[in-house]
């Protein structure tokens, strides 16, 4: 049954990738990658249950934090062309 | 009792998965960036909430339950901030939120 | 001082959840790291009502069930819009008045708006929020000010 949820999540992630490829604006791509990342967090957690290895939950937490920082960093880099000090 | 919990958790898991697919469908189908933001928040709230609820009901109460709740807490704090950041950046980047004068709706549908 | 102690308790809780071990060495290093973090954060002046808004906790616990109900209803509405064979979208954006007094209250309001599917906050000013909604009805509901009043109640309960 966890298999069914995994399949649904993978299908959803494949569909968000369509939006990443098609664009048309960079914001669409960043948004789609962000949603893709949220789904990845849950996919990691469900995979942990599927293979009976609850340690995966720690990876899931780390990915949730990284996904947020990554989205903001991508947006900031796209807007200003650098991530802090002027190059 | 445990059968009932099982049924409830499977229903929550499958409903969450279907909501994720709905959200992804919205990402593909909706016409412009600002409406797609709403599809994204569908995955961030309903999908995350239901799947985590299903997983919590599958776990024996303990450390892993707390970890799942921590994941939920982190996601509920960060995903609206990320959505807001994308919307705000798009607004500053010159996209118009009102449908009358968006010109990217045609190119999105192609 | 009370705020520092509650921060230390929360951080110790997170340490225990993530390590999951009662080994004395691990617990001791947890205590040492938590103390270091609290002292450094205090010296940086970060432990105030914005850096660690524990004073909102009681109000948020009362506010959360209502918000979860709103999110569930909005989820159904947005899912119906997306799954309809012919999508009828009357999206629009408008300024919604926000009467919160503190920045942290404004953050709670803007986050609640974004968390509810169908409405997204685009920019936040001191007294109003630019909201984009998937349906004009959602925008009208927000302008009625029900959520605004409830977030003000969260803010006021100290």
Image (spheres, rainbow, N blue to C red):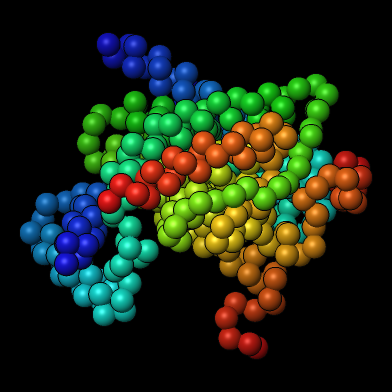
Does any portion of residue A7 appear in the rendered image? no
Q: Is residue C117 left or right of residue C102?
A: right
Viewer-nearest residue: C106 or B51: C106
Q: Is residue C63 left or right of residue C4?
A: right
Which quadrant: the C terminus of chain B?
top right
The residue furthest left is C24
Residue shown at the point (45%, 61%) measured from the top left = C103
Q: Is residue B4 left or right of residue A20?
A: left
| Residue C104 spot, x, y in % from top left | 42, 58
Residue shown at the point (33%, 36%) measured from the top left = C62
Does any portion of residue B38 appear in the rendered image? yes
The residue furthest bottom is A87
Residue shown at the point (27%, 11%) measured from the top left = B1
Q: Measured along the vertical axis of the image, is residue C152 above or below residue C45?
A: above
Res. C127 image quadrant: bottom right
Residue shown at the point (54%, 54%) measured from the top left = B81
Q: Measured along the vertical axis of the image, is residue C73 above or below residue C116?
A: above
Q: Measured along the vertical axis of the image, is residue C151 above or below residue A3?
A: below
Q: How many marks?
A: 0
| Residue B52 spot, x, y in % from top left | 42, 34
| Residue C3 spot, x, y in % from top left | 22, 62
Res. C50 image quadrant: bottom left
Q: Measured along the vertical axis of the image, is residue C88 above or below residue A73?
A: above
Viewer-nearest residue: A25 or C97: C97
| Residue C71 spot, x, y in % from top left | 52, 33
């Amino acid at each position: 049954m966890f298999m069914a949820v995994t399949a649904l999540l993978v299908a959803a992630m494949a569909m968000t990738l369509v939006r990443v490829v098609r664009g048309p604006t960079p914001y669409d791509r960043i948004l789609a990658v962000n949603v893709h990342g949220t789904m990845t967090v849950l996919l990691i957690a469900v995979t942990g249950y599927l293979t009976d290895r609850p340690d995966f939950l720690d990876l899931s937490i780390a990915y949730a934090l990284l996904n947020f920082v990554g989205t903001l960093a991508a947006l900031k880099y796209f807007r200003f062309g650098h991530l802090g000090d002027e190059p | 009792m445990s059968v009932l919990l099982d049924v409830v958790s499977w229903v929550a898991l499958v409903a969450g998965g279907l909501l994720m697919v709905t959200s992804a469908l919205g990402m593909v189908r909706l016409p412009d960036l600002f409406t797609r933001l709403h599809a994204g928040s569908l995955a961030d709230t309903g999908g995350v909430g239901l799947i985590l609820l299903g997983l919590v009901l599958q776990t024996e109460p303990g450390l892993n339950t707390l970890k799942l709740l921590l994941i939920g807490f982190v996601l509920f704090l960060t995903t609206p901030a990320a959505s807001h950041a994308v919307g705000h950046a798009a607004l500053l980047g010159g996209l118009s939120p009102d449908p009358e004068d968006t010109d990217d709706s045609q190119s999105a549908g192609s | 001082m009370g705020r520092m102690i509650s921060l230390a308790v929360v951080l110790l809780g997170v340490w225990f959840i993530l390590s999951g071990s009662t080994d004395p060495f691990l617990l001791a290093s947890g205590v040492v790291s938590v103390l270091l973090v609290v002292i450094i954060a205090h010296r940086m002046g970060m432990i105030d009502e914005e850096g660690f808004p524990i004073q909102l906790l009681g109000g948020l616990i009362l506010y959360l069930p209502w918000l979860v109900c709103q999110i569930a209803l909005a989820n159904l509405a947005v899912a119906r819009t997306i799954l309809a064979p012919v999508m009828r979208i009357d999206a629009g954006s408008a300024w919604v008045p926000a009467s919160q007094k503190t920045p942290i209250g404004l953050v709670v309001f803007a986050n609640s708006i974004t968390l509810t599917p169908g409405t997204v906050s685009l920019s936040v000013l001191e007294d109003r929020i630019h909201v984009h909604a998937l349906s004009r009805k959602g925008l009208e509901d927000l302008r009625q000010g029900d959520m605004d009043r409830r977030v003000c109640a969260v803010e006021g309960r100290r």
